[in-house]
Amino acid sequence: MGPNHDGGSGFHDISFKLGRNTEGLENLNRLFEQHCEDDDRRHVENVELLRANNDAIGKLSAALEPLVASQALTKKRMALLASGGIGILILLSWVMESALKWAIGWLLKIKFGG
């Protein structure tokens, strides 16, 4: 019996399996290359879309800038509004205190007949 004692089918099977593995690897390589190409294409598309979004945001920002500038509160205006608000709160609390004192006095007068 020589090296080919089983009729060569063992070598043939190994060769066949190696060929199938090589074919599978080639398919994997081809799929990986396709994936890389698709990935690169999507990246380019995304970059273009992001640039378009940035341009649109820039145009909108430029269009709204005069409106925002006209509505900006300066420190002086903010201090004036805060002072006015505190004054209104003090006046309102004084009015409420007076009204509450009057109401309590009136109720006590009615209840106890003062």
Image (cartoon, rainbow, N blue to C red):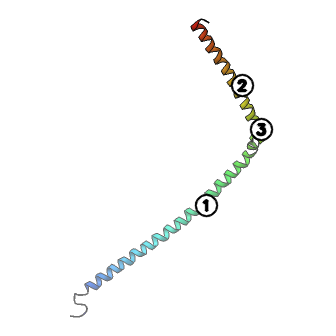
Local packing at callout 3 (Cα closer than 10 Å; few below 14, some 14-19, many 20+) is few
Q: Is residue 61 visible?
A: yes
Residue at 58%, 59% (x, y): give it.
46
Q: Position of residue 29 (x, y in %)?
A: 45, 73
Q: Is residue 74 visible?
A: no
Which of marks 1 and 2 precedes in the sequence? 1
Q: Position of residue 100 (x, y in %)?
A: 63, 18
Q: Amino acid at mark 2?
A: Leu
| Residue 89 versus residue 78 in the image, above or below | above
Which of marks 1 and 3 precedes in the sequence? 1
Q: Position of residue 103 (x, y in %)?
A: 62, 14
Label 3 element class: helix
Residue at 77%, 35% (x, y): give it.
80
Q: Position of residue 49 (x, y in %)?
A: 61, 57
Q: Amino acid at mark 1?
A: Val
Label 2 element class: helix
Work out how far the residue at label 3 is from the one at label 1, CA to CA, in angstroms: 44 Å
Q: Which residue is mark 1?
A: 47
Local packing at callout 2 (Cα closer than 10 Å; few below 14, some 14-19, many 20+) is few
Label 1 element class: helix
Q: Which residue is mark 2?
A: 91
Q: Which residue is mark 3?
A: 77
